[in-house]
Image (cartoon, helix red, strand yellow):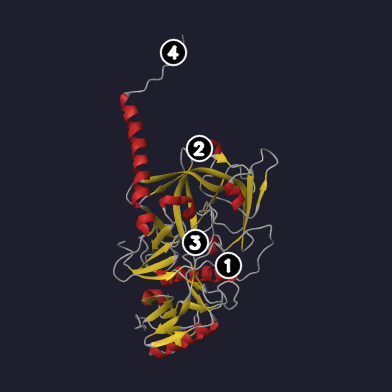
Amino acid sequence: MATNNLTVSPLHILILFFSIYLSSYSLIEASHGGFSINLIHRDSSLSPFYNHSESPSQRMQNAFHRSITRVNRFKQPKLSPATVRSVLIPNEESGEYLMKLLVGTPPSQVLAIADTGSDLIWTQCKPCAHCYKQKRPLFDPKNSSTYRNLPCKSKPCKYLESRFCSRKGNLCEYWYTYGDGSMTKGNVAADTFTLASTNGRSVALPKMVFGCSHYSHGSFGEQETGVVGLGRGSLSLISQLGSLADGKFSYCLVPMSKENASSTLSFGRRAVVSGKGVVSTPLVWGEDESFYYLTLEGFSVGDKKLTYSKYPSAKSGKTKESGNIIIDSGTTLTFLPEELFNELESAVKDEIDLEPVPDPHKDLKLCFRTRTDIKVPTITAHFTGADVQLKAVNTFVRIADDVVCLAMLPSQFSIFGNLAQINFLVGYDIIYRKVSFMPTDCTKH
């Protein structure tokens, strides 16, 4: 009888058992108490996009350009019915935050854009003969023991608007197109995702559905390997987490000046926003299920209240009673209807005892020349049922050594951007349809 020379020591068995125990315990712990992961701003020193030669004002200016490009793409007409249009603008024009995750067994690291404006999770996969250049190793499905291609009759396949069946094996394939013409195409698959929790434990998520991209082109960056959609569609990370998230997620964004600090993204019970100073506003289901719509009723500048009662839709521009603005972590600036912006700009001018100057970069509308911090008026955003009092870090930015500007612009497409959300714990409850805000020092959260 042939014998096997491989011997397994009790120590190896103990290590294997302990590893399985830790993974299982982490998932159980996450399901009961929720969990948090780090978000990396693309311009922080922790990001592979970080450019040491750029000044803080240059990084801010680049973020404005991405922001303006992003909102301009929102306003473009829809593509043909055969394509799915997302709002993500990749590479230099991409979302502002990145997240790390591991895919497969054994795990392969993915650095993806975290995007609240899209749903699909995808990464580039081998073979990828017609793909954008990627510095990190491509995910190889053949090396993962837990990878599975999904059939055309599967429920996740039916969630996709743009899908088709492969000629071989009747497998589900997808085609996903972004607003600037960039696209990804590949297999709809399932595999184990592993997220690194901020408490030091890893959370393994089996059978997560994602796009395994074998064909892509466009303005994607070499450092990023895909996208994690955080919208409210059926295939987004939030929806797929199920009971682990229980329809809840939150984030706390640190100021861009804190280059060595990470922001946090939390799920489930860890995402509940409660305590002194919390205000909540209804979450409105709007024209696109990828977006999170709120109803903005106006602003206050000091004691002067600016009411905007026409409620144009954030997407179509048509008059609506609710859901007139999108809250988005991937857009830096806040964009407002022109009429409301003009009133706000005039009220802010009246409160600041400085002569306005043009933006040297010709991006922003209201700027002042000063080398010191200016005393800015209290600006409050009035959402239905929630008054969100903004601080200077939310409303003004230094774009040169001697110039500060209001971080808002007029647009047909209304967006409450991430600068306005800095140092707030922002919680989304999809089940009870509300968004909550609580002033927080996010460097300590």
Query: Nearer the viewer's eye, disc 2 or disc 1?
Result: 1
Residue 146, which numbered label? 2
- Say left or right for 199 vs 338: left
Query: Nearer the viewer's eye, disc 4 or disc 3?
Result: 3
Badge 4 marks a residue whose secondary structure is loop
Along the polypeptide, which appears first: circle 3 or circle 1?
3
Mark 2 surroundings: few (<14), some (14-19) or many (≥20) residues within 10 A: some
Along the polypeptide, which appears first: circle 4 or circle 1?
4
Badge 2 marks a residue whose secondary structure is loop
Percent of width and height locating residue 310: 54, 82
Query: Nearer the viewer's eye, disc 4 or disc 1?
Result: 1
Q: CA distance from mark 2 to mark 3?
A: 27 Å
Residue 3, which numbered label? 4
Along the polypeptide, which appears first: circle 2 or circle 4?
4
Q: CA distance from mark 3 to mark 1?
A: 15 Å
Dot 1 amino acid type:
Glu
- Say left or right for 429 vs 372: right
Along the polypeptide, which appears first: circle 4 or circle 3?
4
The residue under label 1 is 287
**Residues at discs 4 and 1 in contact (Cβ within 8 Å):** no
Percent of width and height locating residue 378: 36, 82
| Residue situated in front as seen by the camera: 43 or 112 | 112
The residue under label 3 is 116
Query: Nearer the viewer's eye, disc 2 or disc 4?
Result: 2
Residue 241, which numbered label? none
Mark 3 surroundings: few (<14), some (14-19) or many (≥20) residues within 10 A: many
